[in-house]
Amino acid sequence: MNGKRPVAGPVWYVSVGLVLAIPLAAAADMHEMMRSRVPDDKLQEARALRSPLPDSPDVIEKGKALYQGKGTCMNCHGPEGGGDGPVAAALNPSPRNFQHHGFWRHRTEGEIFWVVKHGSPGTAMIGFGDQLTDEEIWSIIRYEQTFAAGHGGHHGMQGGGMGGHRGMGGQGRMGMGAE
Ligand code: HEC
């Protein structure tokens, strides 16, 4: 086989195109993140899903163990959920950064559950529905939500308002180094 082909087209034209494309690409990335990964025909069903689990320290603890262990989420999404796990650099698209508040604002928990269970086709994010039970997935999601909370974002909206405060509350979940 003779694979050589002449290079076609004026090179300067390509370079100008590249310079213009950089800011556009950043905007496109942002836009790309906002796009729901749930297929259109499943969106309604996914958005109707609600976590059966409370946002409590023991659920979060269980989710953390699954995130780091059996679920292998940490390999791609990173120990602090920054989308920077050991395998992340090799992946395109990149694993989601859970510290990003925009991500949580643009998804319902039901959509997130759906993607963890069924995957995002064409990406390294496979569906975990045959490896994790629904309850395990929900507990991991509770844990993932803490990544954004620990980075100066708003908190208090979780749980959908079950009618009031929780006793003494607190529990030191936000505390530095409180495992
Ligand atoms: C092999 C690498 C890999 C592993 C392991 C992995 N993920 Fe992902 N994950 C990705 C990639 C890549 C994306 C981005 C997919 C996309 O852009 O559509 C992603 C996206 C996501 C999203 C965002 C979905 C959305 O709506 O945008 C969630 C939530 C998520 N992963 C949760 C998990 C959980 C929970 C686990 C463990 C049970 C896990 N991931 C394990 C690579 C991985």
Image (cartoon, grey):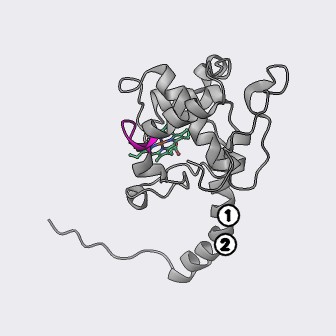
Q: Residue furthest right?
A: 164
Q: Is residue 118 left or right of residue 168?
A: left
Decide: is 58 above or below 47. below
Q: Are marks 2 and 1 in contact (CB under 8 Å)?
A: yes
The picture places residue 104, in percent across and down from the top left corner, at: 69, 41
Q: Residue furthest bottom?
A: 12
**Segment tinted magenta in the rendering:** 67-73
Decide: is 146 above or below 13. above
The tag on residue 24 is 1
User: Which residue is depicted at the point 55% across and 55% down?
Assistant: 82
The residue wearing badge 2 is 20
Q: Secondary structure at mark 1?
A: helix
Q: Amino acid at mark 2?
A: Leu
Q: Amino acid at mark 1?
A: Leu
Determine if the C-beta at disc 2 is less than 8 A from ligand 1.
no
Q: Quadrant of residue 27?
A: bottom right
Q: Quadrant of residue 13?
A: bottom right
